[in-house]
Image (cartoon, helix red, strand yellow):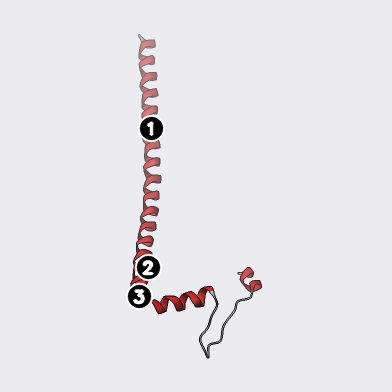
Amino acid sequence: MKKRLKLHRLIYLGVSGYIAFVLIHQQILIHSIKVEQISRMDQITKLKSKNEMLKGQEKTYESNPDLYYEKLAREKLGLVKQDETPIVNSPEKDAEK
């Protein structure tokens, strides 16, 4: 009779331990998923604000294409207007940063 009682206790402890392990593991997974979800929501928020900014630029450049051409000329070709002084960063100082 005592052996049967010990066997029941052993089975009960084994099942209880397994259930505790599964619950703890699930809680850890839930926490990591929530952290990832928060990170993704932050990314979505940043991308939405960037999208709105780009839409605003698009409207500006559609209404006045000369602004866009000027921006391209300044960025890609390094052109400057009259009476402007161009500022050029040296590659050595950029490498130090």
> Measured along the vertical axis of the image, is residue 6 above or below residue 37?
above
Tell me the quarter of the image containing the C terminus. bottom right
SS for dot 1: helix
Q: Residue at left 46%, top 79%?
A: 70
Q: Name the residue under label 2.
A: 54
Q: Foreground mark, 2 or 1?
A: 2
Per the model, the C-alpha gap separating discs 1 and 3 is 57 Å
Q: Residue 60 carries which label?
A: 3
SS for dot 2: helix
Of residues 1 and 38, the one drawn nearer to the viewer in this rendering: 38
Q: Residue at left 38%, top 15%?
A: 7
Per the model, the C-alpha gap separating discs 3 and 2 is 10 Å
Q: Residue at left 38%, top 45%?
A: 33
Q: x, y percentage for residue 68?
A: 42, 75
Q: x, y percentage for residue 53?
A: 36, 69
Q: Residue 68 carries which label?
A: none
> Measured along the vertical axis of the image, is residue 57 above or below residue 39?
below
> Few, some or many C-alpha atoms within 10 Å of disc 2 (few <14, some 14-19, many ≥20)?
few
User: Which numbered disc flags the more N-terminal residue, 3 or 2?
Assistant: 2
Q: Foreground mark, 1 or 3?
A: 3
Q: Quadrant of residue 49?
A: bottom left
Q: Name the residue under label 1.
A: 22
